[in-house]
Image (cartoon, helix red, strand yellow):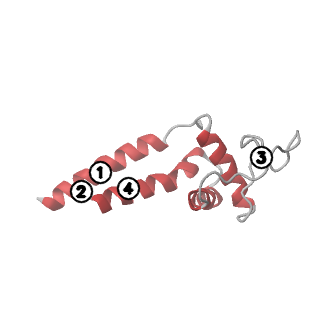
């Protein structure tokens, strides 16, 4: 019985994660900034830039206009960048590492 319950919980979690990753649009604010930074990290993994070619001067005092973007530790951005590099620059590729880590967290919690 515990094995069946574990499989049911993982199946439900998988369904929820697949539904969450299926959207075609990148959400405003946080997800958009992290997706752009991860896209740039796929090209240069050690320099997390928000804007590579800025039309306006950089303003490091403002996080939305800064050249470097490090408001979180870089591991999540590196996993997103690796996924985008392997699968292409898509919304699904950007969200896949988070979905897989969510499933791992469900399994470890069980």
**Residue 25 occupies which quadrant of the picture?**
top right
Of callouts 4 and 3, the N-terminal one: 3
Q: Residue 32: which disc?
A: none
Q: Identify the residue position indicated by label 2 in the image.
A: 7
Secondary-structure class at tag 1: helix
Question: Mark 4 packing: few (<14 Cα in 10 Å), some, or many (20+)?
Answer: some
Of callouts 2 and 3, the N-terminal one: 2
Question: Mark 2 packing: few (<14 Cα in 10 Å), some, or many (20+)?
Answer: few
Q: Residue 66: which disc?
A: 3
Residue 76: percent from the left, percent from the top? 56, 57
Q: Identify the residue position indicated by label 1 in the image.
A: 11
Q: Are marks 4 and 3 in contact (CB under 8 Å)?
A: no
Label 2 and label 3: CA atoms lie apart by 45 Å
Q: Identify the residue position indicated by label 4 in the image.
A: 103
Residue 97: percent from the left, percent from the top? 51, 56
Numbered disc in front, either 1 or 4: 4
Taking depth in this image into account, of 68 and 108 the one nearest to the observer is 68
Looking at the image, the residue that sits furthest to the left is 1
Question: Mark 1 packing: few (<14 Cα in 10 Å), some, or many (20+)?
Answer: few
Of callouts 3 and 1, the N-terminal one: 1
């Amino acid at each position: 019985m515990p094995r069946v319950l574990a499989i049911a919980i993982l199946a439900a979690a998988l369904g929820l994660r697949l539904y969450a990753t299926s959207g075609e649009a990148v959400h405003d604010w946080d997800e958009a900034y992290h997706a752009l930074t991860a896209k740039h990290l796929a090209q240069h993994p050690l320099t997390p830039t928000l804007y590579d070619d800025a039309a306006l001067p950089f303003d490091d005092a403002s996080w939305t206009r800064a050249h470097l973007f490090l408001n979180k530790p870089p591991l999540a951005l590196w996993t997103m960048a690796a996924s985008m590099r392997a699968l292409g620059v898509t919304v699904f590729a950007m969200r896949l590492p988070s979905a897989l880590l969510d499933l791992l967290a469900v399994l470890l919690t069980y």
